[in-house]
Image (cartoon, coloured by chain):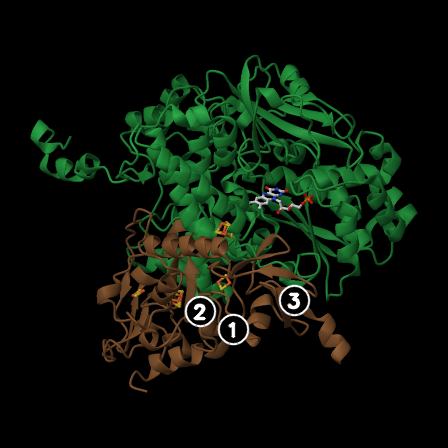
Amino acid sequence: MKNVSDADSNTAGTTGLIHSIIAKAYTESPHLLHVLYTLQQQCLHISEEAVHKVAAHLDLPHSQVDSVVEFYSFFHKIPRGRYDILFSNCTSCGYMAGGVDLMAILGQRLGIVASNTRNDGLVSMGQTSCIGMCDHGAALLVNGMPIVNLDAAMIARIAALVEAEIPLEDWPSGWFQVDDNIRVSGLLLKDRLSAGTGLRAMLALGAADTLSKIIQSGLRGRGGAGFSTGMKWQFCREAQGAAHYVVCNADEGEPGTFKDRVLLHSHADSLFEGMTVCAFAVGAKQGYLYLRGEYRYLLPHLQSVLARRRKLGLLGVDILGQPGFSFDIDIVVGAGAYICGEESALIESLEGKRGIPRVRPPFPVTHGYRGQPTVVNNVETFIAAAHIVLRGSAWFRAVGTGKSAGSKILSISGDCAAPGIYEYPFGVTIRQVLHDCMAKDAQAVQVGGPSGTLIGSTEFDRRLSFDDLSTGGSLMVFSQARDLLAVIVNFAHFFAHESCGFCTPCRAGTTLLKNGLDKIAGGHGTRYDLDEMQRLATLVKCRSHCGLGQTAANPILDGLQRFPQVFGQRLVHRDFEPHFDLDAALEEARQISHRDDAAAHIE
Amino acid sequence: MSADTKQNTITIDGQEIPFLAGQTIMDAALAAGVYIPHLCHRQGLTPHGSCKLCVVDADNRSVSACTMPAVAGQRISNNTPALNEVRKTITQMLFIEGNHICPSCEKCGDCTLQAMAYHLGMLDGHFPQFFQRRKVDASHPTIMLDRDRCILCELCVRASREVDGKNVFAIAGRGINAHLIVNSASGKLVDSDLETSDMAAHICPVGAILIKEHGYEVPIGQRTFDLHQVSEIGLEKTILTKARQPDE
Ligand SMILES: Cc1cc2nc3c(=O)[nH]c(=O)nc-3n(C[C@H](O)[C@H](O)[C@H](O)COP(=O)(O)O)c2cc1C
Ligand code: SF4
Ligand code: SF4
Ligand code: FES
Ligand code: FES
């Protein structure tokens, strides 16, 4: 692989190289995110010159390319190292997951500080939001490839491999082994559909009856919001438009969620089958799978499943010989932005823009991709739909509770002996789940990820369902030994980092909440700060533009309500303590003057 | 017709207000002379919904008045102490995330953000300053861009695209790092096609985009908000005229 990290030296050679990289990437896939990804990979950054050339080649405004480069976490204007290492900072798969700071150890070994590139350009290191390896202990991405089950010994070996410039292909292959860890199988995981069976059932039914079957099944969205899937498809089918689109949301960015990773890996056929069923029901010819950048390692596998389905006549023109029924699926890979899981931000990203949630109404079912009627559903939702056309709505309804038909696939991680994938009928209690995953002394469970609900042990008899505890699939267990405040602080950092920056309450509010929590966790908080936190958190929750801001304060509000003591313990017993720490502010001056004596400090 | 109009009304703070199909709550309110605080909204430009100054409670649900369609029978709270407190906090956020120097700012007295702060009884920034580093662009011969004061309302972005028929501005970056960029190869205003006669050069509600060599021309006492309240309906014209021709 060629490297042109010093592309800024404006030689004709690098200019020509950038041009040929862009031209080649563009012919392989014209999507802006893909062209930028290739540039980032090969040049290790996206220079001003490259932005300019991409804009020219794709015939886009310079500012659009520039704004996209600056929006997504995996694009950089300053060169990254030839080995770019990103540690997850999730509470389950993060660099602190094993109790030791693995990032600090690697930094020490390589002589590098977080978020920097070493002077020799060999290596860069940083942190990134949850990479969905929560059932595999501490994890990192090196040049986009996940390495799991990290410990200090492995970190030492990684440092040595980097220093010796050993190509990734020659690193121990076991390190890259990501398992499914399916522990409990239910309705969907028990037996795999054989490719095409769902489609044949669907063709026998016809579009209208297929749709009624989905409606009658009571299937609701598995991505979190729980909207009726059948109704969504029906609205889309009825909406007027030049084209209809089917989009699968495989952005899976909620910390602690990894069930879509497993479904994409082992049930891709059912997923594509479900998308094809949807296309048939709503009259779409084109579908997109929006895959989070962190799961790019699954791309070759997914492409090969698509290719096989085309060969089998399950995708493409006149599917299964049905004249006029044509549908195909493209995969678009994201580049590190949790907000792109929000369906309208996802659509913006599909269109090659920053992932900014749209104003709603109108909703995607009438004005989605390219302004046309679009269904956006979660991976699991499509898979459930594929099973339902084959097995019937009664089969599905027979499991679960009244308003929450069917099963839910959970990603369980944190302080339990058996993290992994668990599929339960809706209505299962938290207590049952904790028992099965062998969580011995849980003090709290985060249901639905940081944007969900934090509950304590008195609530473990509550049930998973749309009318009690709703979840997109994340369930993080925290034992008595956990510092819950540290968890809440971690979540606050996550949201501040992932806010898209569009609306004032979320853009400034998530940072204010983060700073306020840091102050309390640092032992400088007062009762006044807690009251402020409550007021601010409520404002961010009620007044933000989209679901990110509306849920970002949940861990704080839940924490204040259910675990007030974890905040109370850290407070200083004064009415007011300034945010501004005089002594800390002098640190830079001390560093410059190489002083650390008593007189260089303020009490 | 009369039966129709009777049906198509919303209620804002107890006052019944007619609306036409397609109007937002903001459109209907302004047409009826009811002020809903707003910073990123300007009649004639596509509604944006980002500043959140216009939050109202419609049937007990928080919505942005500038983007939410009016629906017959909606019951809306707008000018309540609780909502104005929320708006004050949001205004404080806008102040502390940027670097505002009101007393010495050229926009002082003509600045809608500042006027909003007075309107809402804001006495201080309340939150600790973010002290963000933001770039100044003085490259253009007649127009100045000081991002320190930008509130990311995208009025300039929309005015350039929708009124001037150009595409001079955009927002880049994510979260608290969001910032205004200029659509030119160098990223500098001088290399863009922005002209002094463009609406985008004058629409900025704060002192982020300024016309050079026209600072402090209007004496204190005669500036826009010395003479007007921000809550006066139809003030946009006055503000824009003033920005174009200060001595008018
Ligand atoms: C900040 C944010 C992130 C989201 N991330 C995801 C995601 O990763 N996957 C997903 O399916 N839905 C996600 N959603 C929900 C989607 O907006 C949307 O409701 C969902 O994709 C619809 O599919 P469903 O009806 O099948 O659940 C997210 C929502 C928000 C507000
Ligand atoms: S709530 Fe946050 S993430 Fe959502 S639009 Fe507003 S700023 Fe963006
Ligand atoms: S420069 Fe002015 S008009 Fe443009 S986004 Fe910033 S504050 Fe709004
Ligand atoms: S005026 Fe409605 S959000 Fe700014
Ligand atoms: S008064 Fe100058 S920016 Fe507001």
* Residue placed most toward the observer, A280 or B129: B129
Q: Earlier in the sequence, mark 3 or mark 2?
A: 3
Q: In the rendering, what colour is chain A?
A: green
**Residue B98: image location, x then y, percent:** 32, 56
Q: Secondary structure at mark 2?
A: helix
Q: Which chain does tag 2 point to? A: B
Q: Which chain does tag 3 point to? A: B
Image quarter hosting the C terminus of chain A: top left
Name the image quarter holding residue B137.
bottom left
| B179 sits left or right of A336 in the view | left
Name the residue that disc number 2 marks: B155
Name the residue that disc number 1 marks: B45
Name the residue that disc number 3 marks: B10
Q: Is mark 2 within 8 Å of ligand 3?
A: yes
Q: Earlier in the sequence, mark 1 or mark 3?
A: 3
Marks 1 and 2 in Cβ contact (< 8 Å): yes
Label 3 to label 2: alpha-carbon separation: 28 Å
